[in-house]
Image (spheres, helix red, strand yellow):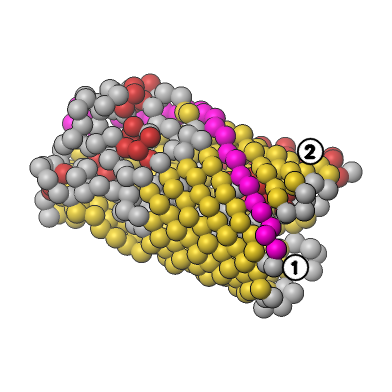
């Protein structure tokens, strides 16, 4: 009976993944959100050493064996305020579209007492949408939207009483839509690609309420997008960058505390890491062609949860990233003005009488501006972004 239930749930998740691949996703740190899973989002994104639900597979697959048989279904509603200043004039990058919906799905099945199989589906992305009358340094009616749906199919196993290891196969589909670049002689349009990678994780229950964890995710090697072979470096390549991180959590009576440190290697993906128009040594689409000039980024996450009683749990957290944008490479950032770095989060969960659980989280990503330096057009360009997130999920065990 349990196996049949698991098969039906897996089928439902796959259908949902295919159906949601056209949904919009929007990031707070590069193309990544501040956390995966509503419970994690409420604690600043903490998850490496704190497995709270089946969404943990998107961060540390080792945590899946610690959450039991369960399904988590949720969505985030994101309101953005982003755009650019060029030569002193402000251009609103959310003029035509400021609300985005990001689905999230997770399920985990215990194969036996020490091992589990799971699937976690999340959304990444970045983008902006200027008014049809805007002309930003020659970019007329500029727009961009990168939408990525990333599924991690994981296997986790306990090693003794204290350790757990997890491995996940990462499968991704992305859709890129760019407009306004034809006005400066570069390709525009829409294309998609598919790719795969690997995610590894480890957790250790050190005793007395302390747990430690580590994760590593390979670069997800995405296929080329022919439409953008004359725009993106390496003839249309746009991979998902590798990352690694470490975390700790501590439980004391009704309190749970967590901290994560994660490093995202944007510079290893040429479309993100190559110098912009002022510093690139190759032409558009070539190996050394212009990119966004994004720096490798370190993310710090801290969070706390308090179990008020058997039904209610409250959460709060803070998430801080090092600066992603390089002030020397701001002009192409008009298409992806990812200037925000700081996030304050709140959350809560209510355990229901039928065994289910309802969770909500709110995150405020504070508005920040990066001013361009150097020669035009970078020196004339400043980028800004701020965001509000409201997430909700329903979870049940089987």
Q: Residue 335 in the image: x percent, y percent?
A: 29, 42
Q: Are marks 1 and 2 in contact (CB under 8 Å)?
A: no
Which residue is depicted at the point 32% across and 45% down?
295
Could you say which disc has been placed on residue 74 in the image? none
Q: Residue 244 in the image: x percent, y percent?
A: 50, 45
In this view of the protein, which residue sits in the foreground, 96 or 352? Answer: 352
- N-terminal-most mark, 1 or 2: 2
Place residue 225 in its image quadrant: top left
The CA span between labels 1 and 2 is 25 Å
Which residue lies under the disc numbered 1?
352
What stretch of residues is rendered in magenta? 180-207
Q: Is residue 77 visible?
A: no
Number of numbered tags placed on the structure image: 2
Which residue lies under the disc numbered 2?
7
Q: Residue 44 in the image: x percent, y percent?
A: 50, 62
On the rendered structure, is 260 left or right of 160?
left
* 25 versus 187 height, above or below: below
In this view of the protein, which residue sits in the foreground, 135 or 384? Answer: 384
On the rendered structure, is 268 left or right of 65?
left
Mark 2 falls on what kind of element? helix
> Which residue in the rendered view is the most extreme toward the bottom?
308
203 is within the stretch colored magenta = yes
């Amino acid at each position: 009976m349990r196996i049949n239930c698991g098969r039906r749930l897996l089928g439902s998740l796959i259908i949902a993944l295919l159906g949601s691949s056209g949904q919009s996703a929007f990031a707070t740190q590069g193309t990544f959100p501040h956390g995966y899973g509503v419970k994690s989002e409420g604690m600043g994104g903490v998850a490496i050493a704190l497995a709270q639900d089946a969404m943990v597979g998107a961060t540390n697959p080792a945590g899946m064996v610690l959450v039991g048989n369960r399904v988590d279904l949720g969505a985030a509603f994101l309101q953005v305020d982003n755009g650019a200043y060029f030569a002193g004039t402000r251009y609103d990058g959310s003029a035509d579209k400021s609300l985005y919906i990001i689905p999230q799905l997770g399920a985990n099945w215990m194969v036996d007492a020490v091992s589990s199989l799971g699937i976690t589906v999340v959304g990444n992305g970045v983008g902006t949408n200027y008014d049809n009358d805007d002309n930003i340094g020659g970019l007329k009616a500029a727009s961009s939207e990168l939408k990525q749906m990333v599924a991690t199919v994981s296997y986790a196993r306990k090693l003794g009483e204290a350790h757990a290891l997890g491995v996940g196969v990462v499968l991704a589909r992305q859709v890129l839509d760019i407009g306004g670049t034809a006005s400066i002689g570069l390709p525009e349009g829409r294309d998609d690609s598919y790719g795969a990678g690997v995610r590894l994780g480890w957790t250790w229950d050190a005793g007395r309420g302390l747990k430690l964890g580590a994760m590593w995710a390979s670069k997800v090697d995405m296929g080329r997008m022919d439409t953008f072979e004359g725009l993106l470096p390496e003839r249309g390549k746009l991979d998902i960058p590798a990352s690694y991180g470490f975390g700790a959590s501590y439980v004391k009576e009704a309190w749970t505390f967590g901290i994560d440190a994660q490093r995202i290697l944007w510079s290893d993906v040429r479309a993100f890491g190559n110098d912009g128009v002022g510093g690139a040594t190759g032409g558009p689409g070539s190996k050394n062609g212009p990119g966004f000039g994004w720096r490798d980024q370190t993310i710090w996450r801290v969070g706390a949860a308090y179990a008020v009683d058997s039904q209610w749990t409250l959460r709060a957290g803070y998430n801080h990233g090092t600066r992603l944008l390089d002030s020397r490479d701001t002009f192409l950032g008009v298409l992806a003005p990812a200037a925000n770095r700081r996030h304050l989060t709140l959350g809560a969960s209510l355990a229901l009488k039928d065994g289910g659980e309802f969770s909500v989280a709110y995150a405020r990503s504070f508005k920040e501006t990066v001013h361009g330096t150097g020669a035009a057009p970078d020196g004339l360009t400043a980028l800004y972004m701020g965001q509000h997130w409201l997430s909700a999920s329903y979870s049940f065990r089987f």
